Amino acid sequence: MNIPLRNALQQAQHLGLARLDAQMLLLHSLGRDPNDRAWLLAHDDDALPTDTLAAYLALCQRRAAGEPVAYLTGCKSFYGLPLAVDARVLDPRPDTETLVDWALELLAPCVAPRIADLGTGSGAIALALQSQRPDAQVLAVDASADALDVAQANAVRLGLPVRFVRSHWLDGVAGPFDAIVSNPPYIRADDPHLAALTHEPLSALASGADGLDDIRTITAQAPARLAPGGWLLLEHGWDQADAVQTLLRAAGFSDVGSRHDLAGIARCTGGRWDG
Ligand SMILES: C[S@@+](CC[C@H](N)C(=O)[O-])C[C@H]1O[C@@H](n2cnc3c(N)ncnc32)[C@H](O)[C@@H]1O
């Protein structure tokens, strides 16, 4: 029996889904853009065919079990770019746009900036920077061949000339760069929040006992690859800004500071390398 779209949304909410998630999954099941909620509001009386309802409820159950909406729809908007994403890469978070905003501000005076994005995942940061700065030379690095496949496919589809290299952080990368940006893994290995993130690659999330192993490695490697006056900008956990500032100062960076995300959390920390 066909039911109206609004009833299908109610069924999802009974499964415990947030309304926004239910709307995106319903739009996806209908073959529409998951972000076209205006259409849904205007058509909530429309009938949903039984087979579409079954497919939609199956997606809702997977969402209720913790799978990110982006994996279920296969797409995520980041900095206005429609990225293809799947379980091979981290689901890009809106908080990470703070890092992109900061890099764009610092690089505004620099002509044809040379930028490295370490741990590119879906390519979110590298592609956002390249789309905003067509004159930039952007290199995207990841240790995961799977992630690089996803990121490269996004670059081709979006027509953005980012270059990609598989490397353990900056091991095989020479520089110099005007900015090195990264959203590395930063969750403590014993953090109970990891239990809720089992659908995303562990290699994109956890980083040693205090969550700072990868940030330590990047901070140690970056000075030799930064041009004089170049910036290292790192995303980190909500309670790691002080620790990352300490690491950057100890490594010899100047102008060390942090940036807050839209929720007011110190989300990124960076510093300048004066050479
Ligand atoms: C938190 S995810 C960030 C993904 C993407 N930049 C974003 O913001 O959505 C961290 C990324 O770092 C990569 N990574 C983990 N260890 C690495 C290493 N040793 N060298 C390079 N990349 C690494 C993971 O494969 C993953 O893609």
Image (spheres, rainbow, N blue to C red):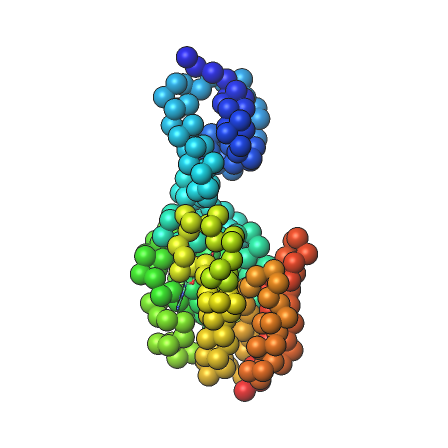
Q: In terms of image quadrants, where is residue 42? A: top right
Whether residue 178 is situated above or below residue 58 in the rendered picture:
below
Give percent across and percent down for residue 148.
Answer: 35, 59
Q: The C terminus is located in which quarter?
A: bottom right
Query: At which x and y percent is residue 106?
Result: 60, 70
Figure check: 218 above or below 97: below
Residue at x 45% of width, y 79% of height: 221
**Percent x, y for residue 84?**
40, 47
Asked if residue 37 shows in the view, the reply is no
Left or right of residue 16, residue 32 in this image: left
Determine whether, in the image, residue 89 is placed left or right of residue 112: left
Looking at the picture, how far across and down is residue 36, in whole percent? Answer: 52, 34
171 relative to 265 in the view: left or right: left
Q: Residue at x 66, y 53 (%)?
A: 263
Q: Is residue 45 visible?
A: yes
Q: Image point 55% across, 57% down: which residue?
A: 96
Q: How many marks?
A: 0
**Which is more toward the observer, 157 or 111?**
157
Residue reaching furthest right? 264
87 and 160: which one is in front?
87
- Compared across the picture, whether 50 is left or right of 81 comes to left
Quadrant in which ligand 1 is drawn: bottom left
Which residue lies at the image location 38% right of the left edge and 65% below the top edge?
Answer: 142
Where the N terminus falls, by quadrant?
A: top left
Residue 149 against residue 70 in the figure, above or below: below
In the rendered view, tell whether residue 231 sits above or below residue 54.
below
